[in-house]
Amino acid sequence: MPLLPALLLMAQTVSSQSIDVPILNVRPSRLLAVLTQLPATGAKVVANDEKSTLTLTGSATDINEIRTRIGLFDVKPQMVSLNLCVASPIDHAEWKASLTLSGNRKWTGSDESTGATLIIVPRRNDDGTITLVVEARTREQAKIQSVVRLKIDESVSLGLPLKGPAVIGGPGALEVNGLRITLTAVDPSKKG
């Protein structure tokens, strides 16, 4: 009978393999944290941030399952292009910027002349539209938070008057004497 346990142990050793999988778009340790939240497989996964790899050890079936999962999460973030205009007539200040932001990641900007702080979290949707989570604050502590959905070449305006409620959209947002913010979704492939 001692032969049978030895054969089983050898069969397990032969079926177990170890491979290094290159990770291209995210930090391997962050990807490993995501993978550990999914239902377990029999594979052991070790992250190496310096080499940008995950080492997978287990059966061929378990390794293939982990590789499939890696393909779902090791993706290049979609970029979102925006034109931004911030104006404050009361401060006699205006500035414009063209931004290319990584999708689903927070961008923060501030301007000393207007006292404005702006936070934008963009997302490119499957239908080609852009969803923006926008938060703006002034030095007078006026604040606006909004979620807007834009088509390419479409704009949204936000106005933070010195007194009174914030205004979103329409000509009213551009008529406030406080902070005025205009965001336009643009197609970066069109040069104009």
Image (spheres, rainbow, N blue to C red):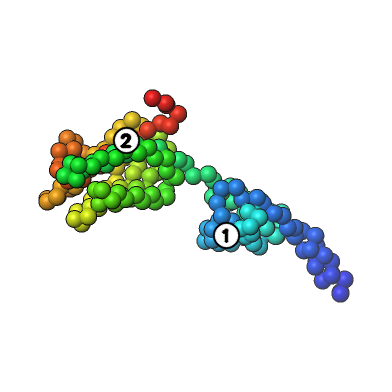
- Depicted 33 relative to depicted 164: above or below: below
Quadrant assignment, res 84: top left
Look at the image and tell me in which quarter the C terminus lies: top left
In the picture, measured across the screen, residue 179 lies left or right of residue 121, that is left
For the point 31% across and 38% down, the residue is 96
Q: Earlier in the sequence, mark 1 or mark 2?
A: 1
Q: Secondary structure at mark 1?
A: helix
Q: Nearer the viewer, residue 83 or 71?
A: 83
Q: Secondary structure at mark 2?
A: strand
The residue indicated by pointer 2 is 184
Q: Please, which residue is most extreme toward the top here?
A: 192
The residue indicated by pointer 1 is 29
- Residue 57: x, y in percent? 70, 60
- Residue 135: x, y in percent? 28, 50
For the residues labelled 1 and 2, the Cα–Cα distance comes to 36 Å
For the point 64% across and 62% down, the residue is 46
Look at the image and tell me in which quarter the N terminus lies: bottom right
Dot 2 amino acid type: Thr
